[in-house]
Image: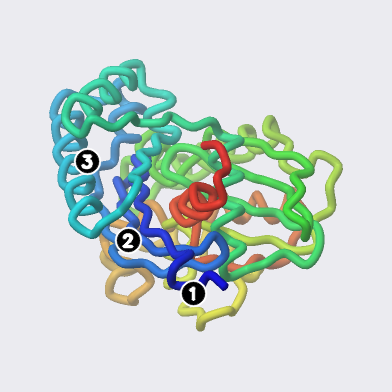
Amino acid sequence: MESRVERLSRLAVVDVGSNTVHLLVAETDGTRLTPLDDESARLRLGADVVQQGRITPQKISETVGVLGQYVARAKQLGARKTLLLGTQAVRAAQNGDELAARIKDTTRLTLDIISPQLEARLGYLGTTLDCPASGMELVADIGGASTQMLFVDQHGVEHGSCSAAVGSVVLPTRFIRHDPPTAEERQALEQEVEDRLREAQPARGFTPESAVLIGGVARRLRRAARLSAGAPLVRAFVERLAKVACEVSADAMEVLQACRYEDADMIRSGAIILREVLRLTGMEYCQVSDNGIREGAILALMRGERI
């Protein structure tokens, strides 16, 4: 009989996101996953796209440099395959193709600019590692430039998905000019979230029995709530966090250990987005997964699923 060790494969995924570029190298058998390296560089490509509609030459050079280092690191660790994924910032950038071409020239690998639907699917696969569904489940990923939502049952069958153009980097870049935000800035930001989520129609006639939140914003919100492992983010707390975070300065949030100074706007916008997602889907709380699209992509690669 083939041993579990013999069935393990070492794979790598680099996710070029709106806030960070993130590398994950892991060993997996297609069911479980053991990280070997997990690192990120905060480049905030999404802010460039909001302000200029494109990624600046400096950020392209920085991104290509980071990708070169990460691909070399994956090779050093013995990854048999390295997958490069681009999400909303690359999808929306007028010069996303230029970035992809520069990356291929440097790494000899193709940057796969994935659809919102595939992004949501990979995020769900990641959650199966620590938050398996027992019924109809909502999986939400609040990214830097967009929020993906997927409805899936306990058998992994998808029952609908949607994407809203609101994220934790894009919103502050567009609406917040003061610290803390003015009442007018907060109202404009909240209205944008409500409008975009209403257009996305996250409920779509489904009544989820549970909800899971993934991504960097999810983990930051969990830290702000000082939650222990496995404890849910409760809607009533998220509503309070959204209110208070917009009333105090970034300095105060750091001193009170709610977040780092530079993450204050992500907490503010992320809490407002999550509050509205929970309200529109009728959920009173959500679990926070430590896994997401990178882990999901590695599982999909091992299972032979097309990405």
As rendered, which of 190 and 24 lies closer to the eye? 24
Residue 173, relative to residue 6: is it above or below? above
Counting other residues with Cα less than 10 Å from the Cα at mark 3, is it few (<14), some (14-19), or many (20 or more)?
many
The N terminus lies in quadrant: bottom right
What colour-coding does the image apply? rainbow
Q: In the rendered structure, find residue 249 and report the number of the disc placed on it.
A: 2
Q: Tell me how far mark 1 sits from mark 2, CA to CA.
A: 17 Å
Q: Residue at x 28, y 30 (%)?
A: 48
What type is the residue that disc 2 sits on?
A: Ser
> Of callouts 1 and 2, which one flags the residue occurring earlier in the amino acid sequence?
1
Q: Secondary structure at mark 2?
A: loop
Give the number of the mark in front: 3 or 1. 3
Counting other residues with Cα less than 10 Å from the Cα at mark 2, is it few (<14), some (14-19), or many (20 or more)?
some
Percent x, y of residue 80:
33, 50
Q: In the rendered structure, find residue 280 and report the number of the disc placed on it.
A: none
Percent x, y of residue 270:
49, 53
> Of callouts 3 and 2, which one flags the residue occurring earlier in the amino acid sequence?
3
As rendered, which of 222 and 245 lies closer to the eye? 222
Residue occupying the far front of the picture: 1
Q: Secondary structure at mark 1?
A: loop
Residue labelled with disc 3:
67
Give the number of the mark in front: 1 or 2. 1
Q: Is residue 107 left or right of residue 291?
A: left
Q: In the rendered structure, find residue 225 and report the number of the disc placed on it.
A: 1
What type is the residue that disc 1 sits on?
A: Ala
Q: Residue at x 58, y 70 (%)?
A: 130
Q: Tell me how far mark 3 sits from mark 2, CA to CA.
A: 35 Å
* Residue 111 in which image quadrant: top left
For residue 251, say whether it is visible: yes
Percent x, y of residue 139:
64, 53
Residue 84, relative to residue 244: is it above or below? above
